[in-house]
Image (cartoon, helix red, strand yellow):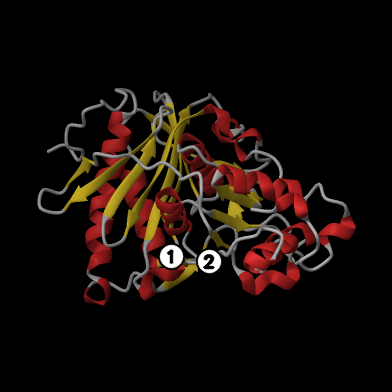
Amino acid sequence: MPMIAMPERAIPDTLSPIVEALCSVAADLSARISLGPLGADLGAAVGANTDGDQQKALDVIADDAFRTALRGTGLRWYASEERETVELIDATGHLALAIDPLDGSSNIDANVSIGTIFCIRDALDDGNATFLRDGRSILASGYFIYGPQTALVVTFGAGVRQFVMDRATGTFRETPSAPSIPAQASEFAINASNYRHWAQPIRAYIDDCLAGIEGPRGKNFNMRWVASLVAETHRIMSRGGIFLYPGDERPGYERGRLRMVYECHPIAYLVEQAGGAATDGERPILDIAPDSLHARTPFVFGTADKVARVATYHDLPAQEVSALFGNRGLFRA
């Protein structure tokens, strides 16, 4: 049985086998995750990946499952956050996939929504060169979210589409309405425990949000932080707002912690298709080419005007961004 119930708008023929394979693995992962402690210990630490980040059992299970399922789908190159190098799947394939097989794995034991992030490109003859390009060459990107609903949110370059897994049939069915990032929102997401390490423009932006209706923004904001990029993205797709993971002064965090190839390029492409914006704080993420497979970048995305506002804070005179709740009248509302 196909993993995607026949949608009204067809999925591009060249991409359909890959999407079907991804859905098949996602359905299996959803079933495993839903068992929680009744199943295997999916949150058990099993080592570290090539960047030194702790791997959980489900990270490895997901990576192996996706790589295996993608054989015979027209995929040539497979690049995973869990693997050091690009892997050849089929020398005659014409497509390439970058994937974060299991995003948010630190939340497995907490029963918080986690997910899978991916993007598809045309394959070049060289595996590394295929992925070390800017994001404007992406053909499709999306994520699976494993939560109260298991859903696929995806773009093929013509807007965003959402499919929810029907547990009765095991298939993904397209929803009547597609996600579109609202133009107005009053939520921001950032790990505020790192405030003391941020650069002044980021501090100034957050200070102004926290100042509420009495501050230069002239409105009250709510703060969120899930520590699961997929969960943060899904909320912004539904309600708008802004997500910030800036670089900071800590060793190893100068360029943030999120990876361009596996996380930021795919999410940025999706967010732009949903009417939002995504930058490294100043430049559009999709205009930036990574210098290595596991390159990291600061990441800011969400409602377009809020993302643009963050970039403007980087252009303010130093005396303005260093003054707590300063008179930044330009940024009211």
Which residue lies under the disc numbered 1?
105
Q: Which residue is nearer to you in this view: 194 or 14?
A: 194
Judge the density around disc 1: few (<14), some (14-19), many (≥20) Cα neighbours within 10 Å: many
Which residue lies under the disc numbered 2?
222
Judge from the rendering whether residue 251 lies leftward or rightward of residue 60; answer left or right. Answer: right
Q: Which residue is nearer to you in this view: 213 or 162?
A: 213
What separation in Å lies between label 2 and label 1 (alpha carbons)? 25 Å
Judge the density around disc 2: few (<14), some (14-19), many (≥20) Cα neighbours within 10 Å: few
Identify the residue shown where x is 12% and y is 38%. Answer: 1
Identify the residue shown where x is 77% and y is 61%. Answer: 199
Image height check: is 158 above or below 58?
above
Judge from the rendering whether residue 312 lies leftward or rightward of residue 276; answer left or right. Answer: right
Judge from the rendering whether residue 164 lies leftward or rightward of residue 209; answer left or right. Answer: left
Image height check: is 175 above or below 105?
above
Determine whether the residue tagged by mark 2 lies in a helix, strand or loop.
strand
Residue 269 marker? none
**Residue 45 shows in this picture:** yes
Q: Residue 290, how many percent across, how many down?
A: 65, 40
Q: Residue 30, how many percent across, how many down?
A: 26, 58
